[in-house]
Image (cartoon, grey):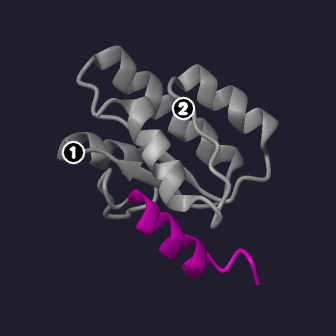
Amino acid sequence: MDNADLQKRWGEELDGKVQVISAISQEEAIEQFAKNLDVEIIAIDSDSKEILVVYSLLALVSTLRSIFVGPIIPISALGFFRQKLIDSGCNDYECSRESLPRVILETLDKWDFNK
């Protein structure tokens, strides 16, 4: 399943529960965040082994963390990369691509945004 199909599935599973704003690239993610400063949760999904992609994503997480206080969920099947995402500012949530909708709902409930 490619990223667009996966994001579509996440949106369908979360439909009516939360508004999903998705981005396929880092540039699109930055644009979406700038347009939607009231987001309550961010999920970062990447399994890239390309060193430039890895470093630019880690820099993006660090930048987001400097201006975003809410939860940032790392999703990566690569253990070393997931740990780098956590070290760069993501929260330490266990999350797979399949479990993301559930983790988002649990996290929003735990952070108590709506009360």
Residue 103, compared with residue 106, is above or below; it is above
Judging by the rendered image, the residue that carries numbered circle 1 is 77
Q: Is residue 83 left or right of residue 43?
A: left
Could you tell me the amino acid type at mark 2? Leu
Q: Nearer the viewer, residue 87 or 8?
A: 8
Q: Is residue 111 left or right of residue 113?
A: left
Check disc 2: other Cα within 10 Å, few if <14, some if 14-19, many if 20+: many
Q: Is residue 34 left or right of residue 77?
A: right
Relative image position of residue 103 (x, y in whole percent): 43, 67
Could you tell me the amino acid type at mark 1? Ala
Q: Is residue 13 left or right of residue 32?
A: left
Dot 1 or dot 2: first in sequence order is 2
x 33%, y 29%: residue? 2
CB within 8 Å, label 1 to label 2: no
Judging by the rendered image, the residue that carries numbered circle 2 is 60
Task: Check the picture and name the quadrant holding the C terminus.
Answer: bottom right
The mark found on residue 38 in the picture is none
Q: What's the CA distance linking mark 1 and mark 2?
A: 19 Å
x 50%, y 64%: residue? 104
Relative image position of residue 78 (x, y in whole percent): 20, 41
Verify whether residue 103 appears in magenta. yes
Task: Check the picture and name the quadrant holding the N terminus.
Answer: top left
x 32%, y 42%: residue? 84
Q: Which region is colored magenta?
A: 100-115
Q: Main secondary structure of the magenta part?
A: helix
Relative image position of residue 13 (x, y in whole percent): 48, 59
x 60%, y 57%: residue? 41
Q: Nearer the viewer, residue 27 or 59?
A: 27
